[in-house]
Amino acid sequence: MGLVSPNPGTIFWMVIVFGIVMLILKKFAWKPILYALKERENSIASALMSAENARKEVASLKADHEAIRLEAQREKEQILKDARDIKEKIIADAREKAQSEAQKAIEQAREQIQLEKVAAVNDIRKQVVDLSVNIAEKVIRQKISPSAEQEKMIDLMLKDLTLN
């Protein structure tokens, strides 16, 4: 049992050696260890601060990105609305212009028809006058006395006219 039971002399020397080791550590190693721990603590705090700043910056950039995206969406919708309005205006203008031109064409056609109608009536009148003059001239040239001969002559002239 000698190994398991503590001897007071051994305990004394262990305490002295432990105290000397502690003094040596305090004198030479304690400050560098504390300095290294403080540096490590500062490094971790700095990294946490940087991470927090980066998180805030990412959140800010995300908010800016969302604002820019919404603005772009609004601009796109406005451009599309303007394009639809312009398209509808162009279509309405083209429709109005086409109706106006169609109305002008109809009016010109009516005027042309009226002019041709007047010309045709005048031409028919002239032909009737010429025909009447020709018939009168032929009747006068032939002095026909019986009325049956006059009717025959008129029928012959009418057949001659329809053939021409």
Image (cartoon, rainbow, N blue to C red):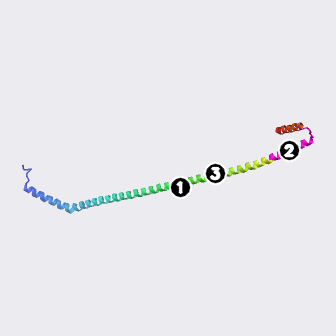
Q: Which mark is residue 99?
A: 3
Question: Which residue corresponds to mark 2?
Answer: 132
The numbered mark, 3 or 1, whose residue comes first in the sequence reads 1
- Is residue 30 toward the left or the right of residue 11 in the image? right
For disc 3, the neighbor class at 10 Å (few under 14, some 14 to 19, many from 20) is few
Percent position of residue 139, x then y: 90, 41
Queried whether the magenta region covers residue 102, the answer comes back as no
* Residue at x 81%, y 47% (from the top left corner): 125
Mark 2 is on which residue type? Ser
Q: Main secondary structure of the magenta part?
A: helix
Q: Which residues are magenta?
A: 123-147
- Position of 163 relative to 87 (above/below): above
Give the image location of residue 86, x and y in percent: 56, 54
Distance of mark 1 from mark 2, alpha carbons?
73 Å
- Residue highlighted by disc 1: 82
Neighbour class for label 2 at 10 Å: few (<14), some, many (≥20)? few
- Determine the residue positioned at 66% across, 51% down: 103
For this rendering, which residue is in front, 134 or 9? Answer: 134
Q: Secondary structure at mark 1?
A: helix
- First of labels 1, 2 by sequence position: 1
